[in-house]
Image (spheres, helix red, strand yellow):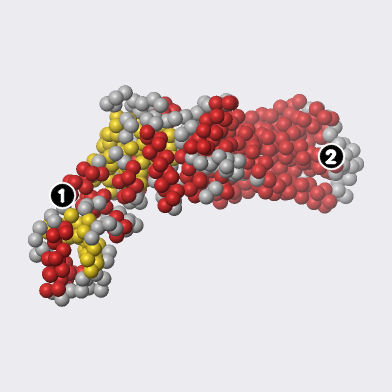
């Protein structure tokens, strides 16, 4: 555990010292938030049934939160470390290899909490109201950060498998279809039948729906449980695969 | 500092082999025995198999065949325990550029179970040892190559390892930094650590190593103390600079030289292996004049490790300057 905390602290320090790696990942979700609201706020006024009296910003906020936390930053940091040779230094230290992965994920948790808090505050500043209040806001931040941690496993996996900076960088693009094959602009029942089917089988949808419920509708334990299940499942699969790859790294 | 029991090899390898994808045999069935407390050199050109051997001994790479023990422990069966007992500074300097020197050393201490005040004290001690106290709070990306290498060496020492692996520790360094690293290696070894050092620099092997092995194309082609290896050559080396003359004609002219054991053509000249180098110079000059060959400088040297390498592999080590190695030997111009 000490190793994880030591490596996590190092990785977190890296985030603070390299703001240029984090700022672009925040610019995109905030940009989408503002642009999407600007484009469709007249189409979906606050009288729209699924907005429950709120502006469209409340509906879009969870999507921006997902964008803010789903990054390849950890994967990029890891592949850079492989490239520079520091990764070998860690491998030859008497630590569990898994702590290298968990150290990175610890930093992802910190980054996820910071990034989602910022986006949430911007959303509130743009007019969103969190129906579930401060406790709900905390749960939203934790869900978003949790998804960020789960998704980071993908970047780590690509970094370890390819050992290539470009491949790891572009792995982030794979998230786009997952984010758009969801009820990101309108609820499930407003999507075309094909899109609805795809959205319903896309697990990312349920994380968005879970967070959106907390913003717009109030406490819905079923939705929250579904979001948690997806996050835990995705995290278990991606982190599990990363752990397998690092355990077999050059072995 | 702990050591393996007297008489036990700090490093031993038996028929160690590593084959990479595509059937590339990087290391071919090598045997090694490094005694506790030795500085053992592993000399060879780029691509000879030095780094692959080090990576296997450090548990970073599994052998394809054969076995190896470090500090008495099998590197495959007891990898975790081996890692606790070794320090490693790999050829590629393993530093995190975002951290300061002090942060990296304290982190490294933590990874070896040294925490709190003990970690801070050990960090101070090591910073002083490698002369980086003043730069301790600067990020390592601002360090010069020599400073990075010294910090990398310090990170390998946090836990006072029994066996220290240094993979080309001075490659790319300026002469002053190289001497500093040599001093550190001597000091570490004087403290009791066994040092396994790979290098492609003959002078480094000659200066630092108690014993050495020459590796070429994945195989060990010679092994012994530097003095033994040179003594086994049993002759002097006369270098004849050919300059504008025809190499084949020069070689032909000198084949009748008394006491000549071997002639090797090399870049810009010939290396003549003779029983009595100094006594042969007059005859060499005479033979060249007889055939009206206008050669350049002639120098005589005792056999160097490069000659040992040449003898074992049929070629010289890359990037070595023979003239530098025999700078203090007599030279005659024709």
Q: SS for tag 2?
A: helix
Extreme residue in the top direction: B5
CA distance for labels 1 and 2: 87 Å
Q: Position of residue A204 (x, y in %)?
A: 68, 38
Q: SS for tag 1?
A: loop
Closer to the eye: label 1 or 2? 1
Q: Is the N terminus of chain A in the top left, top right, bottom left or bottom right quadrant?
A: top right
Extreme residue in the bottom direction: B292
Residue drawn 86% across the image and 46% down it: A44
Q: Image quarter for residue A3?
A: top right
**The numbered mark 1 sits on a residue in which chain?**
B
Q: Position of residue A15 (x, y in %)?
A: 65, 41
Residue drawn 16% across the image and 63% down it: B281
Question: Which residue lies under the disc numbered 2?
Answer: A124
Residue A213 shows in this picture? yes
Q: Position of residue A214 (x, y in %)?
A: 80, 32
Question: Which residue lies under the disc numbered 1?
Answer: B234
């Amino acid at each position: 555990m000490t190793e994880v905390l030591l490596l996590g602290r190092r990785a977190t320090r890296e985030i603070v010292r390299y703001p240029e790696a984090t700022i672009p990942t925040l610019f995109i979700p905030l940009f989408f938030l503002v642009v999407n609201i600007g484009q469709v706020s007249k189409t979906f006024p606050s009288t729209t049934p699924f907005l429950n009296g709120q502006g469209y910003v409340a509906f879009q906020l969870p999507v921006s939160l997902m964008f803010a936390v789903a990054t390849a930053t950890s994967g990029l940091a890891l592949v850079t470390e492989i490239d520079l040779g520091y990764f070998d230094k860690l491998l030859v230290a008497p630590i569990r290899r898994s702590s290298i992965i968990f150290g990175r994920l610890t930093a992802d948790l910190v980054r996820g909490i910071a990034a989602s808090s910022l986006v949430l505050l911007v959303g509130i500043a743009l007019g969103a109201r969190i129906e579930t209040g401060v406790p709900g806001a905390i749960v939203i931040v934790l869900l978003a950060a949790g998804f960020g941690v789960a998704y980071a496993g993908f970047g780590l996996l690509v970094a370890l498998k390819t050992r290539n900076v470009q491949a790891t960088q572009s792995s982030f693009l794979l998230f786009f279809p997952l984010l758009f094959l969801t009820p990101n602009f309108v609820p499930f029942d407003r999507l075309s039948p094909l899109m609805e089917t795809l959205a319903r089988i896309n697990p990312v949808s349920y994380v968005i729906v879970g967070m959106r419920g907390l913003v717009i509708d109030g406490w819905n334990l079923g939705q929250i449980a579904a979001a948690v299940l997806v996050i835990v499942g995705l995290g278990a699969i991606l982190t599990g695969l990363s752990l397998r790859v690092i355990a077999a790294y050059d072995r | 500092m702990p050591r393996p029991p007297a008489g036990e090899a700090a490093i031993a390898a038996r028929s160690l082999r590593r084959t990479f994808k595509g059937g590339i045999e990087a290391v071919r069935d090598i045997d090694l025995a490094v005694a506790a407390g030795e500085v053992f050199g592993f000399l060879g050109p780029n691509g000879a198999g030095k780094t692959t051997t080090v990576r296997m001994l450090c548990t970073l790479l599994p052998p394809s065949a054969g076995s190896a023990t470090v500090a008495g422990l099998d590197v495959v069966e007891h990898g975790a325990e081996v890692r606790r007992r070794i320090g490693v500074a790999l050829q590629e300097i393993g530093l995190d550029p975002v951290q300061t020197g002090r942060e990296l050393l304290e982190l490294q201490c933590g990874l070896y179970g040294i925490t709190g005040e003990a970690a801070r004290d050990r960090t101070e001690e090591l910073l002083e040892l490698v002369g980086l106290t003043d730069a301790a709070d600067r990020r390592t990306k601002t360090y010069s190559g020599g400073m990075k290498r010294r910090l990398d060496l310090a990170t390998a020492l946090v836990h006072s390892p029994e066996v220290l692996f240094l993979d080309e520790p001075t490659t790319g360094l300026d002469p002053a930094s190289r001497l500093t690293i040599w001093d550190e290696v001597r000091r570490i070894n004087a403290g009791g650590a066994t040092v396994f050092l790979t290098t492609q620099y003959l002078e480094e092997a000659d200066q630092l190593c108690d014993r050495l092995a020459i590796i070429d194309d994945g195989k060990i082609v010679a092994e012994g103390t530097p003095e033994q290896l040179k003594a086994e050559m049993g002759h002097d080396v006369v270098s004849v600079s050919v300059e504008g003359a025809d190499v084949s004609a020069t070689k032909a002219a000198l084949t009748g030289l008394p006491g000549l054991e071997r002639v090797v053509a090399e870049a810009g000249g010939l290396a003549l292996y003779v029983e009595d180098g100094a006594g042969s110079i007059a005859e060499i000059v005479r033979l060249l004049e007889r055939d009206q060959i206008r050669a350049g400088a002639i120098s005589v040297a005792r056999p160097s490790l490069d000659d040992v390498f040449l003898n074992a592999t049929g070629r010289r080590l890359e990037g070595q300057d023979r003239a530098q190695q025999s700078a203090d030997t007599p030279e005659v111009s024709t």
